[in-house]
Image (spheres, rainbow, N blue to C red):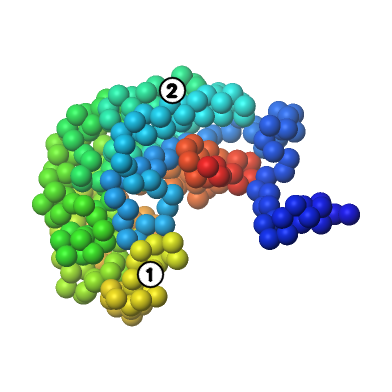
Amino acid sequence: MTLTAELSKLNPQRLPLSLNYPSFKKWKRSAVAEKLEAKPLCLYVHIPFCTQRCSFCYYKTVDLKERPEVDGYVETLCKEIEMVSDRFDLSDRPIHAVYFGGGTPSLLKPNQLTKLVETLRKNFKHFDNKKQFSFEAEPLTISQSKLEAMAELGVNRLSMGMQSFVDEIIKLSGRGHDEKQAYRAIDLAQKVGQGKWNINIDLLSGLAGETEETWKQSVERAINTGVESITVYKMEAFANTEVYQTGVKQETVPLPSEEQEMKFMEYAMERFDRANYLPWCHFTYTKDGIDKSEYTVNIWQGVDFYGLGVSAFGSMGGSLLQNTA
């Protein structure tokens, strides 16, 4: 009798899904040595907490209600860093790039961020030789003390998720900041990080309620900040998002058509070109061509990367890995 048939006796309605077999605790170092040879490595660190859930978000995030949750998560993440470094013999591998994403990494307090970075340094010998240390941030959670801590710890690329510079669209997206707070955050980041990091701004095309006029305003305002790079992502309405329920199923919130989005991008590309923001990939435009995401470049070139934290994924020796909890 097959394993599936045996299991079906236990609960015929809920057959299990095996994401990995045999389980990690059964692995032997010798069995994975070929896949874990000492090649360059990138690290991704996931911080799942947010002050609110955006209407378009489909990532694994947690609306922050209790600060102690973050302390507990940081402690557990440090233990994971120690375990992974030892279990997979990663401590002596060259580190090319490090990326803190989320969620909202800028929710971390300076002491929490310091604890994570120091744990990484302790467990990855070549951590300080990395080419780039990228860190995601958003306007409501940025402060001078946090930015100073980031700079002190070696962050040299700050990626700020603005998505829009028009208050009406920001509100429809379920975000908590407004246009003024966006400008204030960018200005503070530019002052604190002058000569220390490049700043990227994310815009999201196709947001609920977006029109040609509001899109043009966002593009112009992003350019006028003078940041080193602007990234434009297409808003995708996944089934686990609020915008899917309101914009796709119920049609209570207007979503731009594909034809409208094409016009949005044609306008953005023409304006970026005139402002000397040059494309280095199909979604990021850099001022004078100077700012590139080393983490992204390495991933595209097939460099191993390990994802740390809840739901984080990676690729090691051609095998995909993901934390399922």
The residue positioned 73% from the left and 40% from the top of the image is 22
x and y, in percent, of residue 58 in the image: 41, 57
Q: Which mark is residue 245?
A: 1
- Res 47 → quadrant: top left
Q: Is residue 71 left or right of residue 29?
A: left
Q: Alpha carbon of mark 2 to alpha carbon of mark 1: how far?
A: 41 Å
Say if mark 2 contacts mark 1, CB within 8 Å. no
Give the amino acid type for the residue marked by disc 1 in the picture: Gln
Q: Is residue 136 left or right of residue 4?
A: left
The residue positioned 46% from the left and 26% from the top of the image is 78
Please tell me whether mark 2 sits on a helix, a strand or a loop.
helix
Of residues 196 and 239, the one nearer the viewer is: 239
What residue does disc 2 label?
A: 119
The residue positioned 46% from the left and 31% from the top of the image is 77
x and y, in percent, of residue 272 in the image: 24, 62
Please tell me whether mark 1 sits on a helix, a strand or a loop.
helix
x and y, in percent, of residue 127 in the image: 44, 26
Depth check, mark 2 against mark 1: the one in front is 1
Give the amino acid type for the residue marked by disc 2 in the picture: Thr
Q: Is residue 317 left or right of residue 192?
A: right
The residue positioned 67% from the left and 57% from the top of the image is 14
Relative vertical location of residue 98 with respect to residue 278 in this rendering, above or below: above
